[in-house]
Image (spheres, rainbow, N blue to C red):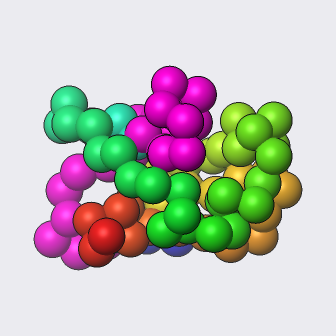
């Protein structure tokens, strides 16, 4: 993987517990992006226990141990 050109912010963490039905993404610049899980059906189908096993790749991508799809930070901003 590589960084996305002209996109200088990274992903620090994902949270699925504090907001029911939503994913909160903490960014490296201090912002937090909150998106409904309905916008990410593959993630929504994962049980909460499996959602906790997330990984950040190259600061701008994330995936899960039980999911083969890789998501980008750009997908968070397109919503």
Q: Would you identify the image quadrant in which residue 38 lies?
A: bottom right
User: Residue 17: x, y in percent?
Assistant: 58, 28
Q: Residue at x 49, y 45 (%)?
A: 22
Residue 6 x/y as whole percent:
15, 71
Q: Quadrant of residue 3?
A: bottom left
Q: Position of residue 60 (x, y in %)?
A: 40, 58
Q: Confirm whether the magenta stretch covers residue 64.
A: no
Farthest residue in the top direction?
18
Name the foreground residue: 48 vs 69.
48
- Residue 78 appears in the figure: yes
Q: Is residue 3 visible?
A: no
The reply, left or right, for residue 29 in relation to residue 4 is left
Above or below, 68 against 51 in this view is below
Q: Is residue 10 magenta?
A: yes
Question: Who's the residue at 28% across and 37% down the image?
Answer: 32
The answer to which of 1 and 7 lies nearer the viewer is: 7
Which image quarter is the C terminus in? bottom left
* In this view, 49 is above or below 78: above
Position of 65 with respect to 72 (left or right) is: right
Secondary structure mostly seen in the magenta stretch: loop
* Number of marks present in the image shown: 0
Residue 53 vs 9, above or below: the answer is: above
Q: For this view, does 62 lie left or right of residue 42? A: left
- Specify the segment rendered in magenta: 4-24
> Residue at the spot x=35%, y=45% of the render?
34
Task: Give the camera-side residue of 67 and 6.
Answer: 67
Q: Residue at x 55, y 36 (%)?
A: 20
The answer to whether residue 60 is left or right of residue 54 is left
């Amino acid at each position: 993987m590589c960084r996305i050109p002209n996109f200088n912010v990274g992903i620090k963490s994902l949270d699925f517990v504090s907001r029911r039905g939503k994913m909160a993404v903490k960014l490296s610049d201090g912002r937090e992006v909150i998106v409904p899980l309905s916008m990410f059906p593959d993630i929504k189908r994962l049980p909460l226990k499996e959602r906790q096993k997330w990984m950040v790749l190259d600061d701008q991508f994330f995936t899960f141990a039980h999911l083969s799809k890789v998501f980008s930070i750009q997908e968070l901003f397109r919503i």
